[in-house]
């Protein structure tokens, strides 16, 4: 179940020349060998696999990983991070509570909790509850039950919504620094990859600040305005959306907010807030790695390291919450059969 198939065979490890931490910190984007998961044949347990076959960075040595961005404050931020964590490995399993978990999530749960356990660390269960349209209380309970059923106890149970105020304040900071702007293009105009730059990309900072405040205060209809980040993802997508308007009560915050942050904006910042050391996710998020690092560094906050692994696919069935829900909504399968999926 947990065998990792590599598209490229990892190079053999060579003894690295000794260097001071300061030298590493000042060498932004230094060419370093990426970590990887070896194939799991012969590993008796998840903990053994994560302890002996997972080759990731050491805690506090984030700057040694390929693509990691450093700033003059990186050393200071890592020092504070180590003081806060005691040098422990800290991971998180961050599902969106919009459906019951399936077998594909078992791999993610075992890798995140297993890696932390194998290294004497901690793993949080964080609910990525930023889309009130699709989230229901029953899914929170079901997800927590499944984690316990697999034999794990979260160090903490957190919610992305715990950080809504901080995320909002950071969005204002990004606008002030010229890294974000309010845009009025429609969803269909910015979907895809060969998209023209927004005509509002270079609007005055003060104007974007006022418009973002207007978004928060409910002065726009849904779809009339978004906050976008000035960056390009690896896959070529330009200026991902950071905030959108949704007039839907949130299960935890009620009607306090009508603007909600997106995954691209929320994920790395919540990882930073929780002092995550290893942000472990499936390959589909590889195209978000550079924006993950860039966003943390735009704000000059502690930046974790993202590592990706192959997602679990099973023949003759569906391992996607979105696709399973589509089958239910289309009445192709009923809820009982969906649970079996």
Image: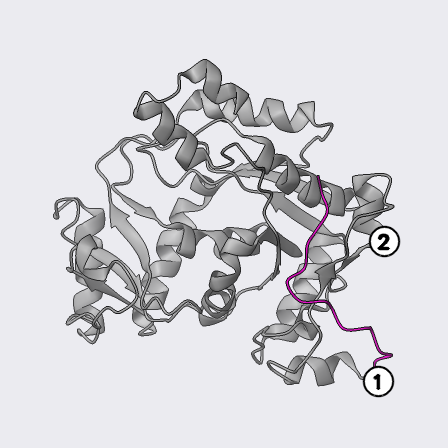
**Where residue 309 sits: x, y (%)?**
63, 54
Would you say residue 259 is visible in this rendering?
A: yes
Q: Earlier in the sequence, mark 2 or mark 1?
A: 1
Tell me if residue 251 can be seen: no
Q: Locate residue 11 relative to residue 107 in the image: left or right.
A: right
Image quadrant where one finds the N terminus: top right
Residue drawn at (72%, 67%) of the image: 9
| Label 2, residues with CA under 10 Å away: few <14, some 14-19, many ≥20 | some
Range shown magenta? 1-18
Residue 290 in picture, x, y percent from top left: 49, 69
At mark 1, the secondary structure is: loop
Left or right of residue 47: residue 303: left
Reading the image, the residue beneath label 1 is: 17
* Circle nearer the viewer, 2 or 1: 2
Q: Are marks 2 and 1 in contact (CB under 8 Å)?
A: no
Q: Position of residue 159 (x, y in %)?
A: 49, 38
Residue at left offset 12%, top offset 47% = 219
Residue located beneath label 2 in the image:
52
Relative horizontal placement of residue 315, taking residue 332 as reference (left or right) = right
Residue 235: x and y, percent?
A: 41, 67
Is residue 6 one of those drawn in magenta?
yes
Q: Is residue 15 above or below residue 317?
A: below
């Amino acid at each position: 179940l947990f065998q990792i198939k590599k598209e490229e065979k990892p190079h053999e490890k060579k003894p690295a020349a000794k260097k001071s931490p300061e030298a590493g910190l000042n060498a932004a984007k230094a060419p370093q060998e990426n970590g990887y998961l070896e194939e799991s044949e012969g590993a008796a347990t998840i903990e053994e696999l994560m302890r002996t076959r997972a080759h990731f960075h050491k805690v506090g040595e984030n700057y040694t990983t390929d693509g990691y961005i450093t700033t003059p404050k990186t050393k200071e931020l890592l020092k504070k991070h180590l003081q806060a964590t005691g040098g422990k490995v800290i991971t998180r399993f961050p599902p969106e509570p919009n459906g019951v978990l399936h077998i594909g999530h078992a791999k993610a749960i075992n890798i995140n909790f297993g890696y932390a356990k194998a290294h004497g660390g901690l793993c949080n269960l964080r609910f990525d509850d930023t889309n009130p349209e699709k989230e229901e209380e029953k899914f929170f309970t079901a997800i927590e039950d499944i984690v316990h059923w697999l034999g794990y106890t979260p160090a903490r149970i957190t919610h992305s919504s715990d950080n809504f105020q901080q995320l909002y304040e950071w969005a204002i900071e990004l606008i002030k620094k010229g890294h974000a702007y309010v845009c009025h293009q429609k969803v269909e105009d910015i979907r895809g990859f060969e998209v023209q730059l927004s005509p509002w990309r270079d609007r005055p900072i003060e104007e974007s600040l006022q418009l973002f405040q207007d978004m928060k205060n409910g002065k726009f209809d849904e779809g009339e305005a978004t906050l976008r980040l000035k960056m390009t993802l690896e896959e070529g997508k330009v200026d991902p959306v950071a905030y959108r308007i949704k007039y839907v009560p949130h299960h935890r915050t009620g009607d306090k907010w009508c603007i909600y942050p997106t995954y691209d904006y929320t994920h790395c910042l919540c990882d930073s807030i929780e002092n995550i050391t290893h942000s472990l996710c499936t390959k589909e998020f590889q195209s978000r790695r550079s924006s993950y690092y860039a966003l943390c560094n735009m704000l000059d906050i502690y930046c974790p390291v993202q590592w990706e692994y192959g997602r679990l696919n099973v023949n003759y069935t569906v391992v996607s919450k979105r696709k399973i829900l589509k089958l239910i909504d289309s009445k192709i399968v009923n809820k009982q059969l969906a649970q079996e999926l």
